[in-house]
Amino acid sequence: MNQIDVANTTRQPHSTIKIEENSTRTVVTLVPAQKEPQRVGPILTGLVFGGIGGFIGLAFTSATHNPIYLLGGLGFGVGMGMLSNKQLNTDPRGRVFATRIEATQDRIEAQDENGAAHIYNAKDIARLLCRQTYNVVVGRTQMFGRPTVATIMGNAIENAGANSRQKRADWYAERSFVVELEAKGKRVVLANGLDEPTAFAAYQAISRQVAIPK
């Protein structure tokens, strides 16, 4: 089977599928949906917290003549920027990968996340699966008691953040469908990072070709 270059696949916001099918062989090529890395958010976070930390650190440094406070304040900003980068650029679906799957009547050959090919004999496959693997509902802050200007503003800011996190979670959830097989008591991911139509199309194409024992 001609393998797809997993490492050099271009990032794209929607998953894609290509199906080559005849009476004896089906080849399914899949490229997952991936977000582009976010750079501006972590940088702005680092600058904002670095400015706040630097201002406070400078005040303490001026009072004590000890530069460690200023360095600590600036370091706080760097740390917050790194934390923001980790949160914004970590894929909650895990590692997604492009793959090429070849199915015949008696076997399935597929690539793993490192591009290595594996063969699964039809007689060993219990079933094929197409399912969603990620779905999150972000909680919202509710106000209790008499509202004040401060609590209203704080609640609005918190809910704006919750809306942003929910939008990000929804993006990943809609593209978290996988195609899997179960063989010899183990579940194997054949393809992931897909939207539902792409995943189901791959699942149907493979199912039509391979003869899984009933």
Image: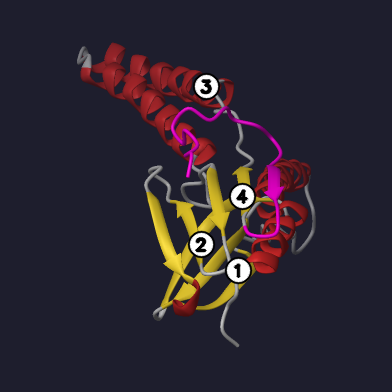
Q: Earlier in the sequence, mark 3 or mark 4?
A: 4
Q: Mostly what secondary structure, the magenta segment?
A: loop
Q: Is residue 17 magenta?
A: yes
Q: Which residues are magenta?
A: 1-24
Q: Secondary structure at mark 3?
A: helix
Residue plotted at (69% across, 44% down): 17
| Foreground pick, 196 / 56 | 196
Neighbours of disc 2 within 10 Å: few (<14), some (14-19), many (20+): many
* Disc 3 to disc 4: CB gap under 8 Å: no
The type of residue carrying mark 4 is Val
Q: CA distance from mark 4 to mark 2?
A: 10 Å
Residue assigned mark 1: 210
Q: Is residue 182 above or below residue 10?
A: below
Q: CA distance from mark 4 to mark 1?
A: 12 Å
Residue 108, numbered circle: 2
* Disc 4 to disc 2: CB gap under 8 Å: no
Q: CA distance from mark 2 to mark 1?
A: 7 Å
Q: Position of residue 103 (x, y in %)?
A: 57, 59
Q: Is residue 139 magenta?
A: no
The type of residue carrying mark 2 is Ile
* Disc 4 to disc 1: CB gap under 8 Å: no
Question: Which numbered disc, 1 or 3, marks the residue closer to the eye?
Answer: 1
| Foreground pick, 154 / 161 | 161
Q: CA distance from mark 1 to mark 3?
A: 56 Å
Residue assigned mark 4: 27
* Disc 2 to disc 3: CB gap under 8 Å: no
Q: Earlier in the sequence, mark 1 or mark 3?
A: 3
Residue plotted at (39% across, 79% down): 184
169 with respect to 110 (left or right): right
